[in-house]
Image: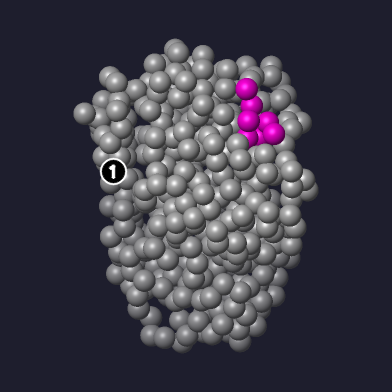
Amino acid sequence: MTEGLNLLVINVFFAPHTYGGATHVAEQVSLQLARHHGCKVTAISVMSRPEFGHYCTMKTEKDGIRNYIINLPPGRTFRQIYENPSVSEQVREIVRFVEPDLVHLHCVQDIGADILQTLKGLGLPTILSVHDFWWLCERQFMIRPDGSYCCQDPIRTEDCKGCVTDIDATRRRNAFLADMAARADLVTYPSAFARDLCERSGLASGKGVVWENGVLPPRDDFFAMQSARRAQDQRLAFGFVGGPSSIKGWPLIQDAFRSLGRDDFKGYLVDASLDGSWYTSKMYRGMKGEWTVHPRYGSATIDAFYAKIDVLLFLSQWKETFGLTIREALSRGIQIIQTDGGGTIEHPGMGQVKLLQIGCPAAKLQKEVEALLEAPRSYPAPIAVRSYAAQAAQFLELAARLRIRK
């Protein structure tokens, strides 16, 4: 039986300090397990605050989940990002107090992968969820220094010489991380693409399963809110959540929308930075249409954003492992223009997607945008997409494979 587990979740961030897609997944699944499956969930995360002592631990609580936050000193070394005995010792003490049945690890950069060795030494079963390529690439996302995508498949450390500053240090890092990942009882990935690339590259081969991420479904009043906005303003509205970097396709959007010959539409740029610094007006100056910077959204405000748009622009220039915003949009009846790559195409409703190739010229995007603006106004039906409730239920099925002592 896995209902009522005493579960410890470890991730670099956790509420009340939330940042990034993996953190959102860790939090939402934890909430589902606690609220609907009787699980006691405790979290461990990290911070780096100068007003607190090095490696001291602060306990916080949100939504009934306690979070033990370990304070890291500034100026940590390259090695301490992936192996830090001081953090491991703090984790050991917290584990002895919490006495979990199972440990679920997400992103452990800055925490250190050596906690896997610590946890196994304590006799605890572990599930490791890989959200990106940090375990194989010290740059985390397989992005080269020039901003282009590294196309290695499989990933081989010797072929990383052009990206890293010290190939010997990279060899030691990758060998250590491979050893630590192999100690996990089960390794999950958000897509078959991520699992297959990681296992072909030698990471915990044979232990991987696809554990697809869920999304927050639209609230009961979402479609009424969406219909009211569309009735009030019939202009097509585009949305971009990726951030102003070349790897997310921002220059492609700038060029395509500056070349359009019409202005009869709206656009929203989501500023997901912590300080609202991503976009200034000059960054979208010259782009046709009426563009607005929209503040970052969370679980309470996600519907307010998606009710404003009709088309999501997802133009990543690298092969991402999942594509959360694509699923969020599809579940709300929103058209997608996306690039073809990685786990971002492993979703239902591909018939509602305009698919572009990674590296395509801006003229291709411009053509798709013009076609949508010229077409008679119609909106796709919402697609059933996996929820966090379903994702949590599958987690318990995966946990049932392990030998858990309760």
Q: Position of residue 60 (x, y in %)?
A: 50, 22
Which residue appears at 70% of the width and 62% of the height? Answer: 147
The region drawn magenta spans 79-85
Q: Quadrant of residue 290?
A: bottom right
Asked if the stretch drawn in magenta spans residue 296, the answer is no
The answer to whether 240 appears left or right of 287 in the picture is: left
Q: Nearer the viewer, residue 316 or 253?
A: 316
Determine which residue is flagged by label 1.
394
Residue 84 covered by magenta stretch: yes
In which quadrant will I find the N terminus? top left
Tell me, yes or no, if residue 292 can be seen here: no
Which quadrant of the structure image shows residue 39?
top left
The quarter of the picture where residue 285 lies is: bottom right
Element type at mark 1: helix
- Side of 47 where 130 appears, left or right: left
Residue 85 relative to residue 24: left or right? right
Query: In the figure, 373 relative to 13: above or below?
Result: below
Per the picture, the main secondary structure of the magenta-coloured stretch is helix
What residue lies at 29% left-to-right and 28% top-to-bottom? 403
Between residue 340 and residue 178, name the one nearer to us.
178
Residue 108 vertical placement versus 254 (above, below): above
* Three-letter code for the amino acid on which mark 1 is drawn: Gln
Asked if one can make out residue 78 in the rendered structure from this viewpoint, the answer is yes
Q: Residue furthest left?
A: 1
Q: Position of residue 76 (x, y in %)?
A: 73, 31
Mark 1 Cα shell of 10 Å, populated few (<14), some (14-19), many (≥20): some
In the rendered image, residue 103, in percent from the top left (x then y), is placed at 41, 28
Image point (55%, 68%), residue name: 315
Q: Residue at x 57, y 17 (%)?
A: 89
